[in-house]
Amino acid sequence: MGPGPVNGDPRVLRAMSAALLGQYDPAMTALMTETQGLYRDVFATGNDATLLVDGTSRAGIEAALISLIVPGDRVLVARFGRFGHLLVEIAERCGAEVSVVDAPWGEIVPVERIAEAVQQVRPKLVAVVHGDTSTTIAQPLEELGAICRDAGALLYVDATATLGGNPVETDDWGIDVVTAGLQKCLGGPSGSAPITLSPRAVAVIDSRRSVEAGIRGPEDPEAAPADRIRSNYFDLGMILDYWGPKRLNHHTEATSMLYGARECARVLLQEGLDAAVARHRLHGRAMLAGVQGLGLTPFGDLEHRMTNIVAVEIPEGVVGDAVRSAMLEDYGIEIGTSFGPLHGRVWRIGTMGVNARRDAVLVTLAALEQALRRAGVAVPTGGGTEAALDVYAGEP
């Protein structure tokens, strides 16, 4: 019940136990094609370039940024938590001239400030985390696509923590690249990074391709070395050829992860995107009400809280890690702390994926009540579970 990874959906784990296939087995390539179609629906996009990058969600982030950024490119990052800092670091490693528009942890970056920064910086790429689990805050995205497009910039969004449990409208919001992971709202294990790219983003990648001659040939002598993608594994041009009709060899596909990613999408779409978001919103509201019922103070801007995680201030005099250890050792329930300025200051409690359900919320709140009481905190008896039950009672 932490910020992720969370428990895997049993259907996903069963799917991953299927027999392995060779990467060019017709059944395997058919599964790859099917998975692409499923994730178009998950991302709410018509992008042909929708696929998986083998690796954790950070692999998807690196593949996107290293394939789009040429050294010297101007990149603007909207930063309001730990993972905004990660985008800055990766962009700098790609050789970008990085500008940042910051907000205090627990707040969003106002859209007007991003728009002003876009006009001042004139970046090639604007990068933003949708939901930063370090702060539990979700950055509004609806207006950013138009702002970027008017300025000739690409918009990249890291939706690792939000996809499947919060609205992510790739096409309607005008997002050029979205990456994610399986280990949060999608209810799978870490190890596969879904990604979708708009035709504008693909055109940038295509402009950086090496010469092709059925297989990758020698580098184009006319291409400036700075324009070449400086990774083989994360070269999205090559990965697109691998997933596309050419089926050009790139790497050995992570077969079991493909099975898992496919099943994550199937489970989500069977439930329905709107229904899944509503489920995460309901159980997130119940958890929020529950921690408030225990007398705890939520952290951050509640108006922009992610549906699937809540942060609460650790009561004064309480050793946060000791309570976390008691929750884990006595009840088998994991909750998280945070990073940087919030480490030891807040607990982060997730309700996502298969754990976004009533019994998980109520048991977690009951265990937290007992752990707090043993830590010397006077909490209302049954205050957490009663508050959560009131939320559920108000649902049709």
Image: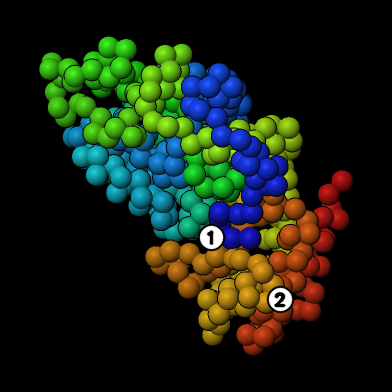
Circle 1 is placed at which residue position? 300
Q: Decide: marks 1, 2 in contact (CB < 8 A)?
A: no
Percent position (x, y) of residue 281? 69, 48
Residue bearing mark 2: 369
Which type of secondary structure does the marked residue at label 2 adopt? helix
- Tell me residue 309's x, y (percent): 60, 55
Q: Nearer the viewer, residue 169 or 63?
A: 63
From the top left corner, tell me how far across and down residue 150 is, in percent: 37, 23
Residue 20 figure quarter: top right
Q: Residue at x 48, y 73 (%)?
A: 344
**Can residue 53 be seen by looking at this rendering?**
yes
Q: Is residue 120 visible to us here?
A: no
Amino acid on which the number 2 mark rests in the picture: Glu
Q: Classify 10 Å Cα crowding around label 1: few (below 14), some (14-19), many (20 and above).
A: many
Q: Secondary structure at mark 1?
A: loop
From the image, state whether disc 1 or disc 2 is nearer to you: 2
Which tag, 1 or 2, sits closer to the chain's start?
Answer: 1
Q: For marks 1 and 2, give the CA distance.
A: 22 Å
Question: Which residue is at 41% across, 56% downward?
Answer: 82
**Residue 180, above or below 198:** below
Give, as a three-letter code, the residue at label 1: Gly
In the displayed structure, 61 sits above or below 174; it is: below
